Image: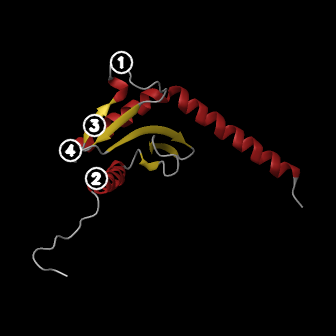
Amino acid sequence: MVRVGAVQGCRVRDGVERLVLAGRELVGVRSSVRHLDLLAVTLDRSGWGCVPVYRLPVRPLPVRVPVLWVHGRGNDAGLAVTVLATCAGWAYMDAGDSVNRFLGWCWDRPGTVAEIDGRLMAQISEQDGPEVPLRFGGGR
């Protein structure tokens, strides 16, 4: 048997969480930009190139959330990173992946950089293709 008060309490809690998230989104652009700037500095030290799309005078994409383009230097690998408010806090998300969006928490930049590094290295290895051993002479 389910108590009516328990169900109403869940509805109230869900409503409060929605209000908190909406409040974070309203004041969140400045926070998102700050988190993305800090991530860009950390990624630059790790050797990845970053283009803060939110700082360009003309925005190439009509998006409402700030986006940081992370790319490998000298190849076509890239990743669009944004910051979103979640119930547990601010999180870095992959803007181009609808399934595996979560990259890491904003308070854990080294872990996020490791995740981004892994995803970009996987893209680079996919672009290079599998290595085929070469046979010289009369190999079988």
Amino acid carrying mark 3 in the image: Cys
Task: Point out the tag, 1 or 2, that comes first from the N-terminus.
Answer: 1
The answer to which of marks 1 and 4 sits earlier in the sequence is 4
Colour basis: secondary structure
- Residue matched to label 2: 124
Residue labelled with disc 1 = 58
Within 10 Å of disc 4 (Cα), the crowding (few <14, some 14-19, many 20+) is: few
Sequence-first disc among 3 and 4: 4
Locate residue 25: give its quadrant. Answer: top right
In space, the residues marked 3 and 2 are separated at their CA atoms by 16 Å
In x, y percent, where is residue 10? 75, 48
Pointer 1 local density, CA inside 10 Å: few below 14, some 14–19, many at least 20: few
Residue assigned mark 3: 50
Residue at label 4? 45
Q: How far apart, in angstroms, are the residues tagged by discs 1 and 2?
A: 29 Å
Name the N-terminal-most of marks 4 and 2. Answer: 4
Q: Is residue 84 left or right of residue 7?
A: left
